[in-house]
Image (spheres, coloured by chain):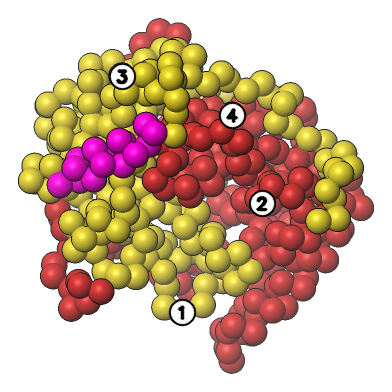
Chain colours: A red, B yellow
Amino acid sequence: MKQRIFNKDEAKVLEEIILHRRDIRGNKFLQTPLSDAVIEKILYAALNAPSVGFSQPWEFVIVKEQSIKEQVKQSFNEENQKGATYFKGKKQKQYLQLKLEGITEAPVNIAVFYKKSKDPVLGQTSMKETGLYSVVCAVQNMWLMARALNIGIGWVSLINPRKIKRILNAPAENQLVAYLCIGHVVEFLEKPELEIIKWESRKLMNNVIINNKYKIQKHENI
Amino acid sequence: MKQRIFNKDEAKVLEEIILHRRDIRGNKFLQTPLSDAVIEKILYAALNAPSVGFSQPWEFVIVKEQSIKEQVKQSFNEENQKGATYFKGKKQKQYLQLKLEGITEAPVNIAVFYKKSKDPVLGQTSMKETGLYSVVCAVQNMWLMARALNIGIGWVSLINPRKIKRILNAPAENQLVAYLCIGHVVEFLEKPELEIIKWESRKLMNNVIINNKYKIQKHENI
């Protein structure tokens, strides 16, 4: 592989892919099947993600069987109902009107697992969680690659990981990191849906950037 | 923002950025300062990462002061020494020859924190860790955007998060997710260094893909 220098237009392409990526739910998925070539391209992006100590601690379960998706959907239904109770009044009403997943609508689901290495991993000896973080980097690569192929991904987190593991016969040592719904889409919304409906507002860069160190905190010696 | 359809060449650009991204250490960083425009482009990519419930639970500490970097480097030295003890014989010798960070060589370090929301977050009620995962998605966006700008990033995980928080006066509730070293580079290696020196071998796609569900495990009822 030659030393590759990217030009401004190419950097701009990446910026646009990042800006136009969306979380896709069931009301935006088309039933059109996904070709194997597309799934492979998305997985290839995952496999080339960074990983602590080059441990590549990931496994991907490609779910196409509708009966499996329906079991996963049941776990979503339970967790979503619980989830709604965290919000009150108007906010709860708004919550209940949102379509938060596309498990059965998407032609393909992918469950992404962290599989802990049996041997010590270089770079993971002080911060164990970097193994999980490697898997998340792979998921973000998939999300961006899908968007570049005009394919939508939705990340479903309102599920019970223990139940999903049981449904998929996953080995006890595997940890579920992400459950993704993937498919062609009706459209990519102009902005994140939760921004459009004013559920949360966008944070300004100045509010999340600190120069050199935080100003002295009252609780600095906790 | 208009509906954006990407073409094959644009998808290919993303694939190349993903394939040519490397973890950069001190022996590959140039002293050349980073322009504010470049830092801002990288942070803009971070701020447009996906986040659970659009919570954007991230904070970025931009470290340019050399004295702060030197304190962080000391934590690395301690953790790296401990890290080496996990490996024996030849492997330990190889470990000790590796340059695993570029804290003081890189013109800019960025400490990336997870700041837990005070209110319940939509989508985070069943899998709490998705808040941390949102921050990792932001880090991966930064890494790719940096590469597209021909800038290198190295993720240092051989540090003690409690010590880094103390050095940066970070609020008690903040959780350190990543410590990044950023700068212009001498070169991007052809392959990951740990692959080149055969520390770990690359996993084949077939070995990490499962169709529909795992075959029955002995410990399925654990």
Q: Are marks 1 and 4 in contact (CB under 8 Å)?
A: no
Q: Which residue is mark 2?
A: A176
Point out residue B141 in the picture as x, y percentages from the top left corner. 42, 42
Q: Which residue is mark 4?
A: A47
Residue A206, located in which quarter of the rendered image? bottom left
- Residue B73 on the magenta segment: yes
| Magenta portion: prevailing SS class | helix
Quadrant, the C terminus of chain B: bottom right
Work out whether residue B80 or residue A127 is closer to the camera in this orientation and state it.
B80
Point out residue B118 in the picture as x, y percentages from the top left corner. 41, 78
- Tag 2 subunit: A
Instruction: Left or right? Give the position of B87 relative to B109.
Output: right
Type of residue at label 1?
Asp
Which circle, 3 or 1, is nearer the viewer?
Answer: 3
Neighbor class of circle 3 (other Cα within 10 Å; few <14, some 14-19, many 20+) is few
Point out residue A112 in the picture as x, y percentages from the top left corner. 66, 44
Q: Which residue is mark 3?
A: B97
